[in-house]
Image: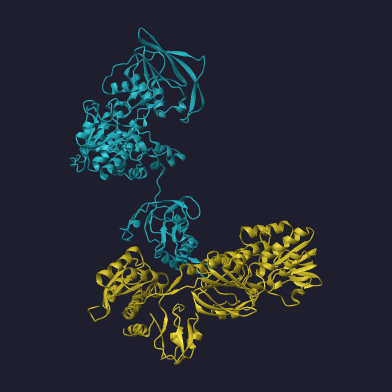
Amino acid sequence: MNPQDKQSAVLVVGAGVAGMQAALDLADMGMKVYLLDRAPVIGGAVAQLERTLPEGQSSSCEVGAMFDAISHHPNIELITNADLQGISGEQGSFEIAIKKRAFRVTEKCDDCGACYQVCPVKPYNTFNEGLTLRCAIDHQNYSFLPLIYNIEKETPACQETCPVHIDIRRYVGLIAEGKFLEALQVIRERNPLPSICGRVCHHPCEGMCNRGQQDEPIAIEKLKRFAVDYEMNLRRQGLLPKLSAPKKPTKEKVAIVGAGPAGLTCGHDLAKLGYEITIFEKESVPGGMLYLCIPEYRLPRDVIEYDVAFIRDLGVDIRLGTPIGKELTLDDLRKQGHKAIFLGIGAHKGLKLRVPGEDEFEGFIDCIEFLKRVNLGDKSKPGKRVIVIGGGNSAVDSARVALRLGCDEVYILYRRSRKEMPANEWEVEEAEHEGVQIHYLAAPVKILGKNGRVTGMECTKMKLGKLDASGRRRPIPIKGSEFTIEADVIIPAISQQPDISFLSEVHGLEISRWDSFVIDERTMQTNLPDVYAGGDAVTGPATVIEAIAAGHRAASGIDRYLRAR
Amino acid sequence: MNEKRGLPSVGVFVCRCGVNIGGFLDTPALVEYAKTLPGVVFAKENLYTCSESGTAEIKKAIQENDIQRVVVAACTPLTHEPLFRAICQEAGVNPYLFEFVNIREHCSWAHMKEGEEATKKAKDLIRMGVARAIELEPLESIEAEVEPSALVIGGGISGLVAAASLAERGFRVALVEREGELGGMLRHLYKLYPSDVPAEEVLKPWRDKVIDNPLVDLYLESEVISVKGYIGNYDVVIKSPEKEIPLKAGVIILATGAQLWEPPEGLYGYNKKDVITQLELESLLMKGKLKADKVVMIQCVGAMSPERSYCSRICCVTAIKNAILIKELNTAASVHILYRQMQAYGDEYESYLRRAKELGVRFVNFSPEQSPVVENQQVKVYHQLLGRELTLPFDLLVLSTPLVTQRGSEALATLLKVPIDQDGFFLEAHIKLRPLDFSTDGIYLCGCAHYPADVGEAVSQALGAASRASIHLTRGYIKVEPIVSSLIDEKLCQGCGLCAGLCPYGAIEMVDTSEGKKARIISVACKGCGICAASCYCQAIRLSHYTREQLEAQIRALLSA
């Protein structure tokens, strides 16, 4: 750093009387002063006092003069409602990081005072040392500086945790007040697939719910389902107005590849912003993995249709059975006038087991293949005895579906213990209850076959060793513990990758070694400026709510990109 | 110009102050009334005139209605006049064309239960305010250059610290010390509480900084004999043993310290041999000449008495410190401290007190009605808790006497025209908001000259005073409020000098002219108190913003009802 870069500016941390006086003296000397305080207003403890020692002067009369001097001092810049985050550098050239909380009342406020008379939220009044209640919106004191109203608001743990940051507190509160449709409006602000998420979201919000420390967390997911069901019933009874005709788009055309949760969300957001959206979907149904992979007993098809209808209603054109590939390439989409393309193709290609015999015998069916087939209407039995390999939701779903199709015996083989199993705990429990036999700490060694068909599998028992990169204990085979399970069908469910075979040979996109798209995480932009990607196609197999979050981010990235052009 | 009567157009803003005014006075009626007053072209009420929206309305009204005089009927000028003046300025109206009418303290609060009468009174006050506003004149603030140097009076620890830190900022400092050596009281102290560091260790680095800094001019064995001028521009004369030296200074820091009250011979047997003061004990400890097995200390000797009603603050911890030092020299020695109230405040001094108790120092509380009696090498004291008299034989009796004002303080106060309190200590401008300033701009104080302080406090105050003083020195100019006196016509002045004698800020000097002696007002030093204007027999002095015309208009308006 050059000496001429040295700043003649001072940061004063804390705007009580000491901080205020220091700021005034320094500013009077001609220095630029930043006066920082955590509170929305300055004045500190002294301003809270009625009178001060020793002469019994009213404190506001004493600090009031300071307020006036500070508010009109050209050299003092107030930074209130903010926290000091860090200091780096050295004397003469400190770099300060400050986190400022939002003031939620703008300068349009007319000081009418109506808000705080009706505000129902009553936190403790810190100004009065918590002896009384105040409302969440308040001005601290008339004679304070700056003279502002402020809404005291922290982000609740649930909202913070939710990948799309639904205002959970608000919608749960509205449900408690019986305002079910209003609650649903709040959910839809951030989540365009509420019916789906009301049923299959893995709801990390509940894990963080403070109520859980008391007894049980608030049933956030089920409350969401309730709100949607309520609306669904009213609509079916014809008690709600029909969805209105879509508005005419006013902005550029954007193409979305894949009608899964990421693509649907991205299309939803962009359509609301006025873009003309076409979603190209390879399969004959919308919803992507939600439709193809999640069994109907977990997520009824009409529920998917219900959410999709809302998105269609925004004017989003969902073209089913329209794969992107040789017939219709990304370049063709560009030629059609699409100014940006979002790739939400999911991760549909199952990984191989890489054990001897895998390519030798018939009787293998990948879990995604299997679930897709069933969900699209083929209800035939895959075989008599089925082994599913893996511990995720797809594995458990496959096993339960196989059982429900009438297979005699269904096994799940998982190489770690139940604690490490990524599938939802309640799904595993239900699967066991239905009769799925789960072998924990077991892994395939060799596929056994006869006459070209699978007859069973040789397995080995495992033990858990040291933690690996994923934070889980690495399974190690126990020598001599081999055993055999007889089976005629083997369903590997050990993870999936995006299927990028649809891309032309010279697509120019940066692809990771797991065949996923490489993107800028803030904008979801790929290395091609007009191509964006998100969801499983970027992260590998993940959750629906994460895909929705990715859709939101991509939509805002595309919007900014198109507006900047 | 107001079309009604050729008067300047006046805007009146009536504040409801929430319920503070609106809850007691009929503010809509006040607005309607204001509209009927001569000159008023606009009147409105606000919920809070001082709020962002209230001040925005003033600005808007000024611009839309071509308002030339602004009257706000609200609370006290003490807190909000600067705000409204600034608003006027931002809207393009000279800030001194603003008149504040206090209908809160003077009406709604004073007459809460007589709403109707209070409303009537508010109308009177608003009428008076409007009448005066019409007579107001625009004023421009006064600027003057600041001589970038300082005079520090006193070479004790606070004077040294103040001088060193001003010189470190690059300003020339004249440091005047009456004695032949720097260091003041600290030269006579052995070790300092609560860390027991030798006083010399604290003193030396500051003294070296002052001696080594070429920007500090030292005047030892010298006194300030004349100070003339005002902030930014003082003419000082220093009398050194050799000659009188004139010099210029922009600011003055007063750090003359205090002295220990010496008891009269015979008080508690005071004889400077086996009955001594704490300061004399320090000297014994410093020379290593202390020989005593039975030590008794009496606190508050000559303090908290009718003559010196204040607590000297430092004597309790000094006694504790010296008791600890005695105990550390000779564990077997018995030390009793007879006290009235133990002032060992704060965590640090509190634990220091505990340490003394752990070392076996005995603390005996006495009441002033039953003061200890000394006779035959014994102290007799009534023990409050035991309920009986104790007899404590001693071979050394130490009297803790208070710090009192430095000799010559009064003369210095007259010279600098700064106030002193009933005990002779210098009086700050405001006990909390301006503790290191005098009410006269440009003069600052620190250390025991203000009030008994320990070394840590004196150093803090000195750093603070230097910092306050360097505001003006750094900026290089001062800007003062233009509400000042001026001579209407030099011919009117008879040169009696009454005004110059009465001026509390030294802002008037008598100068010789061809027409004889005449008063000359130093606007920069004038505080606008108006004493000169009120006392001038010849009505030769006029105080701007409070002119005869303005006040008369106000009084006429009151009587016109």
Tell me if I can see residue A220 in this picture.
yes
The quadrant of the rendering that contains the N terminus of chain B is: bottom left
Q: Nearer the viewer, residue A26 or B335?
A: A26
Residue A177 locus on image (x, y percent): 33, 45
Q: How many marks?
A: 0
Query: What residue sits 37% from the left and 59% below the top?
Result: A148
**Apparent side of residue B148 relative to residue B34 in the rendered image (left or right):** right
**Apparent side of residue B479 relative to residue B241 in the rendered image (left or right):** left
Q: Which chain is cyan?
A: A
**Apparent side of residue B43 relative to residue B268 in the rendered image (left or right):** left
- Which residue reaches farthest top? A451
Residue A509 locus on image (x, y percent): 31, 32
Quadrant of residue B337 within the rendered picture: bottom right
Q: Nearer the viewer, residue B515 or A429?
A: B515
- Which residue reaches farthest right? B376
The quadrant of the rendering that contains the C terminus of chain B is: bottom left
Residue A494 locus on image (x, y percent): 39, 23
Colour scheme in the image?
by chain
Q: Examine the rendered structure and indicate whether residue A179 appears above or below residue A415.
A: below
Q: Which chain is yellow?
A: B
Quadrant of residue A75 within the rendered picture: bottom left
**Apparent side of residue A501 relative to residue A81 in the rendered image (left or right):** left
Tell me if I can see residue B362 in this picture.
no
Quadrant of residue A229 within the rendered picture: top left
Q: Nearer the viewer, residue B19 or A466?
A: A466
Q: Examine the rendered structure and indicate whether residue A31 appears above or below residue A169.
A: below
